[in-house]
């Protein structure tokens, strides 16, 4: 289908119901693999906000507290509370930048790395069992979900800049 000789082909629109069902399935899966759920691995327990911050720092070691707050869309005060808690739990360490003692960099600790490894193993085991050995489409689904995540972040950034 095309909207004219001068434009790109237009993909058929997916229904609101299909998109809502997709989101609902994602939420149900997230609940079923929640590390605080009944099948939880032996890791340091984190609140939702702490997990959000920990995930960002783990993927972006050396980030500043301000960068973490901005990237996670948390108010600086809420991010600060989460960071203090993660430091107290031994999951994050604050380091001063070698070139500027006023700058703080956040890094995951060895305990955090160990917890992330256990969590990833837990997720892999849960999904492997759920898929019953048929992992066809997993990589494509991960690409699709990453694209959705990026689009949501882009949309949130546009909304924030419009305020």
Image (cartoon, rainbow, N blue to C red):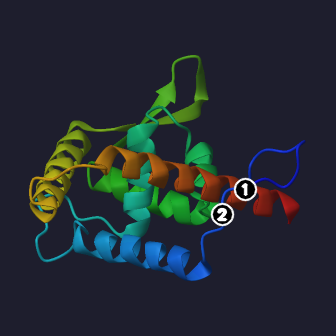
Question: Which residue reaches farthest bottom?
Answer: 17
Q: How crowded is mark 2: few (under 14 residues within 10 Å), some or many (20 or more)?
A: few
Return the x and y of residue 115 as percentages of the image width and height.
Answer: 19, 49
Q: In which quarter of the image is residue 77?
A: bottom right
Please name which of the two marks, 1 or 2, marks the residue nearer to the observer. 1
Q: Residues within 10 Å of mark 1 (few under 14, many from 20)?
A: few
- Total marks in image: 2
Return the x and y of residue 10 as percentages of the image width and height.
Answer: 73, 55
Given residues 97 and 150, the one toward you in this image is 150
Local secondary structure at mark 1: loop
Residue located 73% across and 56% down the image: 1
Q: In which quarter of the image is residue 51?
A: bottom left
In the rendered image, the vertical position of residue 67 relative to residue 102, given as above or below: below
Return the x and y of residue 112 as percentages of the image width and height.
Answer: 25, 45
Residue located 63% across and 54% down the image: 151
Side (left or right) of 21 relative to 93: right
Q: Which image quadrant: the C terminus?
A: bottom right
The residue that mark 2 highlights is 12
Residue located 39% across and 61% down the image: 50
Side (left or right) of 91 relative to 151: left
Label whose residue precedes the other's in the sequence (1 or 2): 1
Mark 1 vs 2: CB contact within 8 A: yes
Return the x and y of residue 150 as percentages of the image width and height.
Answer: 58, 50
Local secondary structure at mark 2: loop
The residue that mark 1 highlights is 1
Residue located 55% across and 56% down the image: 148
């Amino acid at each position: 289908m095309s909207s004219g000789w001068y434009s790109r082909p237009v993909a058929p629109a997916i229904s609101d119901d299909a998109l809502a069902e997709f989101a609902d399935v994602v939420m149900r899966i997230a609940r079923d693999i929640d590390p605080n759920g009944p099948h939880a691995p032996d890791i340091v327990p984190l609140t939702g906000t702490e997990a959000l911050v920990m995930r960002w720092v783990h993927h972006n070691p050396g980030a500043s507290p301000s960068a973490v707050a901005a990237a996670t869309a948390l108010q600086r005060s809420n991010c600060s509370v989460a960071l203090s808690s993660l430091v107290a739990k031994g999951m994050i360490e604050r380091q001063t930048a070698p070139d500027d003692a006023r700058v703080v960099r956040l890094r995951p600790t060895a305990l955090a790395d160990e917890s992330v490894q256990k969590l990833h193993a837990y997720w892999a085991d849960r999904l492997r069992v759920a898929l019953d050995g048929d992992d066809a489409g997993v990589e494509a689904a991960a690409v699709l979900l990453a694209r959705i995540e990026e689009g949501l972040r882009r949309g949130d950034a546009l909304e924030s800049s419009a305020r």
